[in-house]
Amino acid sequence: MFGTKKSSATRAAERFFKERQMKIHFVDLKERPIAKGELQRFVQKFGLNGLLDMGGKAYAASNLAYLRTTEESIIARVIETPELLKLPLVRGGKVLSVGDDQESWKQMLEQG
């Protein structure tokens, strides 16, 4: 699970898994950035716009809506500024989820 300790959605996901005695590996994106290859998995499934928190303060402050830029430079910016993402990013086996997605989390539990 990738997120930040300040993110309420990340804390909700953590609580969801702990209540069901599912062991998680949490990576705080403030302390350790997500690997580019790991982020690519999520981009391939959801698309870059599907990962961006376009309603968030960080997105507004970054002016990404007004910039003409490449996907590569946006990915680099997301790695530097995790607040641009809808958090948490959760990977369980082959199931990936973005944000508060309890249906996907339940699928992860079923896979064990």
Image (cartoon, rainbow, N blue to C red):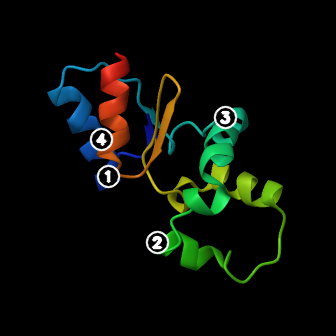
Question: Mark 3 = which residue?
Answer: 35
Q: Mark 1 is on which residue type?
A: Ala
- Is residue 37 shown above or below 88? above
Residue 56 image label: 2
Q: Is residue 77 left or right of residue 58?
A: right
Q: Position of residue 73 (x, y in %)?
A: 80, 59
Mark 4 in CB contact with mark 1 (< 8 angstroms):
yes
Which amino acid type is shown beneath numbered disc 3?
Ala
> Spatial distance from mark 3 to mark 4, Cα to Cα?
21 Å
Q: What SS does tag 4 mark?
A: helix
Which tag, 3 or 2, sits closer to the chain's start?
3
SS at badge 1: helix
Q: Are marks 3 and 2 in contact (CB under 8 Å)?
A: no
Residue for point 83% across, 70% down? 69
SS for callout 2: loop
Q: Residue 16 in the image: state x and y as whole percent.
A: 22, 36
Q: Please name which of the two marks, 4 or 2, marks the residue nearer to the observer.
A: 4
Residue at the location (34% across, 15% down)?
112
Q: CA distance from mark 4 to mark 2?
A: 19 Å
Q: Nearer the viewer, mark 3 or mark 4?
A: 4
